[in-house]
Image: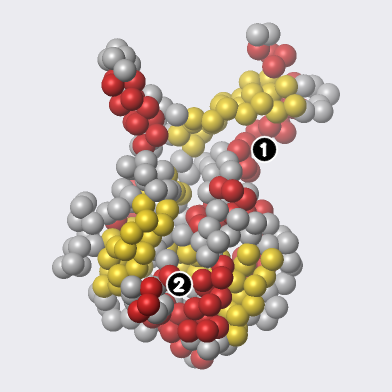
């Protein structure tokens, strides 16, 4: 089963990289881009019997390792639920 | 006394710390591999600078799970002095042994330069030989030293006097211009509530001989030697208002 984890900085946390990307886009003329927030994207291939079990495992991994709860939050998608 | 210098894959200031302890200060020092499960009777532990596990994921994020870290935690819980330098500080943050987290420097640049830091607290094992307010000229070398914590956490750090070092100008004033990375409240280093675990971004081990441009870092090592001589972990606790 495939899970996707999107880790992003909390809204209250300044994102120096996102700011730099925003500035670069403005230099390229993309003035309609008001703000960029940079995050991390993980794909996990998991041995799990159900989407719920996969979600539980991934949430634990995200809490423990993939994200730092002091500055980041995350969102999980289980591939079967996405039907991309 | 005996220093333990923990070596993670990617540590690169371990030799500097070992050299400062053993050759400059004439103490015993032993490298402890991160997969070891014993601190081998050390009196103080140094988590050195570098790029543990390549800084993959986040600085310190993987190192905190190294087997030696549970020993370091036990040692700290028993009152043993632990110093995290640069990447070692980042590891202490990820491990939850100190509060907060590091963000990329606000300039998004790696900063490698001498800076001034002011010693704000002298009742930690790593600053007890300092004068209150003493200015130290010590190099920094990091890309992620932009200390962050929620405002209520910063307020608690101030109230508990846990901010041990701040970036300041020559007058000892923590100005924005003297803040090299955007750290909240100009925080260069802090301690835990028990005051025996200290982390800082500047590198005292790289400022232990005048040949290196500054010997201001020596005082941190001299402090912990004195602390251990007086039974570190059993230091008289200052009452916190």
Q: Number of numbered discs present?
A: 2
Q: Position of residue B175 (x, y in %)?
A: 20, 56
Q: Position of residue B1 (x, y in %)?
A: 57, 87
Does B69 appear above or below A60? below
Near-viewer residue (B66 or A77): B66
Give the image quarter of residue A45: top right
Residue plotted at (74% across, 67% down): B37
Quick check: can you spot residue A83?
yes
Q: Chain of mark 2?
A: B
Name the side, left or right, on which B70 lies relative to B186.
right
Name the side, left or right, on which A81 lies relative to A26.
right
Q: CA distance from mark 1 to mark 2?
A: 38 Å
| Residue found at the very far bottom of the displayed protein | B229
Give the image quarter of residue B210: bottom left
Near-viewer residue (B158 or B91): B91
Name the side, left or right, on which B98 lies relative to B39.
left
The residue that disc 1 covers is A60
Does B97 appear above or below A59? below
Give the image quarter of residue B118: bottom left
Q: Chain of mark 1?
A: A
Name the side, left or right, on which B128 lies relative to B25.
left
Quick check: can you spot residue B127?
no
Near-viewer residue (B194 or B39): B39
Element on which disc 2 rests:
helix
Residue B129, disc: none
Residue plotted at (55% across, 61% down): B12
Residue B205, disc: 2
Residue plotted at (67% across, 38% down): A61
Element on which disc 1 rests:
helix
């Amino acid at each position: 089963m495939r899970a996707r984890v999107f880790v992003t900085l909390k809204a209250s946390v300044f994102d120096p990289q996102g700011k730099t990307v925003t500035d670069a886009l403005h230099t390229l003329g993309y003035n309609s881009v008001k703000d960029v927030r940079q995050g991390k994207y993980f794909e996990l291939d998991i041995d799990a019997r159900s989407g719920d079990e996969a979600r539980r495992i991934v949430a634990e991994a995200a809490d423990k390792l993939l994200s730092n709860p002091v500055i980041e939050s995350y969102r999980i998608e289980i591939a079967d639920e996405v039907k991309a | 006394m005996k220093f333990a210098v923990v070596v993670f894959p990617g540590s690169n200031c371990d030799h500097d710390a070992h050299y400062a302890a053993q050759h400059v200060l004439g103490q015993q020092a032993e490298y402890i591999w991160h997969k070891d499960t014993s601190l081998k009777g050390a009196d103080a532990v140094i988590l050195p600078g570098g790029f543990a596990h390549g800084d993959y994921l986040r600085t310190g994020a993987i190192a905190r799970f190294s087997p030696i870290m549970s020993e370091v935690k036990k040692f700290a819980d028993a009152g043993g002095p632990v110093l995290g330098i640069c990447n070692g500080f980042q590891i202490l943050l990820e491990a939850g042994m100190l509060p907060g987290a590091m963000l990329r420097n606000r300039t998004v640049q790696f900063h490698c330069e001498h800076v001034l830091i002011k010693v704000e607290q002298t009742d930690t094992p790593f600053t007890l030989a300092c004068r209150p307010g003493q200015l130290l000229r010590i190099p920094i070398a990091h890309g992620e030293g932009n200390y962050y914590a929620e405002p209520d956490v910063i307020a608690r750090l101030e109230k508990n006097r846990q901010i041990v070092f701040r970036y300041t100008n020559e007058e000892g004033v923590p100005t924005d211009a003297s803040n090299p990375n955007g750290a909240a409240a100009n925080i260069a280093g802090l301690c835990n509530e028990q005051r025996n675990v200290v982390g800082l971004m500047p590198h005292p081990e790289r400022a232990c001989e005048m040949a290196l441009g500054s010997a201001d870092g020596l005082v941190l090592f001299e402090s912990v030697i004195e602390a251990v001589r007086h039974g570190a972990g059993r230091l008289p606790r200052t009452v916190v208002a």
